[in-house]
Image (tube, grey):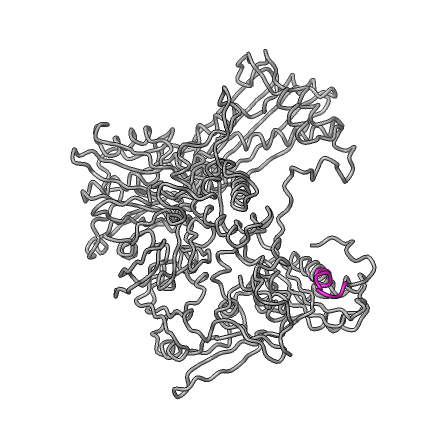
Amino acid sequence: MLICESYHVPKTLEEALRLWAEAPDGSRLVSGATDILPWAREGRAGDVEIPALIDVTKIPELKGYSCDKGRIRLGAATVYQDFLTDRTLMTNLPCMPYCAIWFADDQIREQATVVGNLVNASPVADGTPPVVALNGEIELTRLEDGAVRRRSVPVADFIEGPGRTLIQPGEIATAVTVDSAYGYGGSFQKVGQRRSLVISVACCAALVRADSTGTVFEDVRLALGGVGPRPIRLRDAERRLKGERITQELIQRVAESAADSVGSRSRKEYRRDVVVNFVRAGLEEALANQPEIGAKFKNFGETENA
Amino acid sequence: MPKIDLTMDVNGRKVVKQSEPHKRLLDFLREDLNLTGTKEGCGAGECGTCSVFVDGKLVKSCLMPAAKADGAKIETIEGLARPGSLTPVQQAFHKTGASQCGYCIPGMVMAATSALRENPDAGIEEIKERLGGNICRCTGYTKIFEAVEIARDVIAGRLPETALDEDATGESFIGANVRRLDAPSKVSGRLKYAADMKMVDMLQMQVLRAPMPHARIVSIDTSEAEAMEGVACVITSADVPGTDGFGVFVHDQPVMARGKVRHFGEAVAAVAAEDLITARRALAKIKVEYEELPGVYAPEDALVDGAPVIHDYAQDNVIKHIPIRKGDIAKGFAEADLILEDEFRTQQVEHAYLEPEAGIAYVDHDDVVTVLSPSQNITHHRHMLAEILALPINKVRFIMSPVGGGFGGKEDMIYQGMLALAAMKTHRPVQLNFTREESLVASAKRHPSRVRYKMGLKWSGEITAIEFDMLSDGGAYGMSSEGVMRKAAILSCGPYEVHNLKVDTKVVYTNNTPSGAFRTFGGMQAQFATESMMDMAAEALDMDPFELRRINMMRIGSRTHTQQELTTASLDRVLDAAEEASRWEAGAPKVRGPRRNDLGGPDTRKPCTLGARIGEPTDTQTKDERVAS
């Protein structure tokens, strides 16, 4: 069980940063709390006694989202359920609803935050691949000489390995800023030990926009999770698709080349098979999910999904 | 530990309480407010029994610090309907029989209520999706989904309110949909399971468990734990006054490890303290010195000469061997046109009832040691405990609390003895609530089995002989193993008349988690082998699998494997009904090729898909627009 000596609920970001900077070693920030409580149980960390929990959920600046210059800034309090209920987020971040629906369950999605998921830096975090595909940048905030200072780091660089990030002592992740992908089709592929309420063994986020005729890939974004210590953006695959005619053969060829991106040490062959199928299925589904343009290419829809 | 002030609106009433900073919302509701309709099934966000509304959103209260809900509006199962009444969702659960053991039901009712609040027109796929965070082990979910659909239609006015009433029964109750008498107490969260009960001055127990599977206990030093403030007592096997040993057949299991531990997670010592945290901290102060022993982890290894001996009384590690002989198998196999041989293995399975083990013990005013727990076998437990405590039977009493799912897993007296000892030592009520992890590690499992099978058949399909040899992993203690082997032997060759058979079922000790009772009690493992063999025989004989079964089925006048003459038999009708209901495509297995037309019909379950709600926005306030670029 998790035992804490004190529980703080700062009302402003400044107060939170001050508490966090001064917190005794071992103290933890709490936002969704959906991982820290199961963590402090038998089989993981067991009983954990920590000096302080600092709850950042009552800070107004971390709530909600804002849009500017084709980018969307998601406050750290943004929860996964928002991607299934907020129309603006659903249409501008079209891979996120598919990610969210496979993420835990309705109850947990009401609590679990995207930013918390990123800071946790699990190699199998569902939220990482779609955020990386959306060119996400995480905002890290700290107090410096009494003033609030912010810096931004691309999420692809921020996560260094399992549980390891570039966050520094005293810093709080306050937001993640992502591209608006309005008009794109989105998809999220995931496989775990079972279908429901499960942690990924591997996952793939895809975003696709075809040209107005629906025959050429105008833009493609692909990212993988669960196949290495860090999230993987498939830049090479994206380059090979962009500007090309949409054909089943091209998709299959590019999908097969993605297998080499698997860096996991365990179940490597299995993951290679999964990645090939996920890239193909992700591209096909994203093409089909485009809101305005129907993709036109031969054989589409005849292949089976992974 | 400094207290914190919490203010919430709980079920429409303002609540101001001092609580501890570490408490989860679940603890605050159950312990501080006595709202025990909200259950703890796993404590890790997996099962959904703790679901409550916080500011209108359904959350799992085991994943929310209570302080995070400070200032919020909380709605629990107790607050859904006025006292004495039930909401349409609760009434529908009552009507369809959706509540069986009832332990998941408050959470299910909350999830169903949330689903219909979020989308009053939710279709069945969306309903399933929105109930996806809640686990039920009794119903198979069908009756729950049926209830939510009825409630949805009544709330929307598509069905009359009378649709929630009990169906009329005609002259007979047989075939009629009769409501369960205990359902209202379950759908409203009012039924008190053992973990929901509180007694004045009650202590909390926690158990120190073995960190290795096979070891001699060199010493146990409890002095530091006993000296702690708030600790009322520490118990070990040295506190047992009578003959220490329990088990459904052989009394080979001590209340707590005595001299050695035989499986990982076996109870070694227990602490009763003023509160849970003190009890847990005291566990860390108990010093146990172990001398690790070589272990046995596969049943085959247990039978090898020189294998480590797990119980002194059973030098060969055999718990039980049940042989059945009928006819002459040498003659039977000689008559066969075809002999098939194969091996079948099944794995260990956890019951995973939603209610983890829990119990309370106290010594009453007449010195009667009383144990309240969801025991599936209280009379037997009472007799065993009297021996263990060296008390006359009239000084030991068992009360069966509502069983939040058992499936055989609560037949073994794995914790009631510890509770009784602590109550006797302190003369205070003592409660022990298992965590889910503890339940998984300490409770009995379904027997893993290996069956070596040899079946002789004539070209006509008639079985001429069967040799059936089962070896089961009994784990560290005997528990129900003997009965499970007996049942496996009796049912071994299935409902088929076999004139020549040789059946052996054997269960052995290993250092794995003990195996015990689990639905079908050995029948499943045997039938998996027999029915697989029948299908493989049908393939080899180029015969319809139903036909092969009809040729061999037991009829009136048949003699069972144990030589009982049957005066009634119904397999013919069972096969007819199954063939029709499955829209069976008649013919030998190979006539179908890769596709069969009897799969994927309207009443078959489709693979899980998610996303029924995507594309149907629930938020109609914001427009579908591109953000500024």
Q: Is residue B303 visible?
A: no
Q: Is residue A289 part of the magenta span, yes or no? A: yes
Whether residue B101 is visible to the viewer of this picture, yes or no, is yes
Give the position of the C terminus of chain A as an image quadrant.
bottom right
Question: As displayed, is residue B498 above or below residue A132?
Answer: above
Which sits in the foreground, B391 or B458?
B391
- Residue beneath the point at 56% across and 51% down: B129
Give the position of the N terminus of chain A as an image quadrant: bottom left
Front residue (pair A111, B543): A111
Where residue B211 appears, as percent x and y from the top left, is 38, 51
> Where residue A163 appears, x then y in whole percent?
49, 68
- B86 drawn magenta: no
B547 is higher (above) or lower (below) than B448: above
Instruction: Using the image, determine if residue B569 lies above or below residue A191.
Output: above
Q: Quadrant of residue B6?
A: bottom left
Q: Nearer the viewer, residue B125 or A159?
A: B125
Tell me where the magenta segment starts and ends, as one range.
A284-294
Q: Is residue B575 left or right of residue B25?
A: right
